[in-house]
Image (cartoon, rainbow, N blue to C red):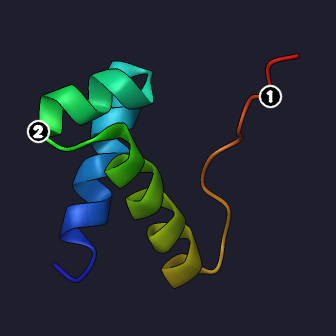
Amino acid sequence: MFFSKQLNQFIALAKNGSLNQAAESTNVTSSAISQGLILLEKKLGKNILVKKIKY
């Protein structure tokens, strides 16, 4: 599958609900999860996540 790494990261995020937990479950850093999702969004040409901003 073409997007397998990024899709796995996206699925891990959806299952776990946080970058840190997704990173832990996939044995990568939370930064790697974030960058993988940005890459996936660029490849798809669509935003797939709504990012929450904490004030």
Residue 40, image x, y percentages: 45, 70
Q: Which mark is residue 12?
A: none
Q: Amino acid at mark 1?
A: Ile
Cα distance between the residues tagged 2 and 1: 26 Å
Residue 24, image x, y percentages: 19, 27
Quadrant showing the C terminus: top right
Q: Residues within 10 Å of mark 2 (few under 14, many from 20)?
A: few
Closer to the camera in the image, 4 or 52: 52
The reply to whether callout 2 and callout 1 are in contact (CB within 8 Å) is no
Judging from the image, what secondary structure is the residue with disc 1 in? loop
Q: From the viewer's perspective, is 44 left or right of 36?
A: right
Q: Which mark is residue 53?
A: 1
Q: In the rendered image, which quarter is residue 17 located in?
A: top left
Q: Is residue 32 above or below residue 6?
A: above
Q: Is residue 20 above or below residue 40?
A: above
Residue under the image location 53 percent in, 64 percent down: 38
Q: Residue furthest top?
A: 55
Q: Amino acid at mark 2?
A: Asn
Residue carrying label 2: 27
Closer to the camera in the image, 6 or 1: 6
Residue 51, image x, y percentages: 71, 38
Q: Residue furthest right?
A: 55
Judging from the image, what secondary structure is the residue with disc 2 in? loop
Q: Residues within 10 Å of mark 1 (few under 14, many from 20)?
A: few
Q: Is residue 36 above or below residue 31?
A: below
Residue 34, image x, y percentages: 46, 50
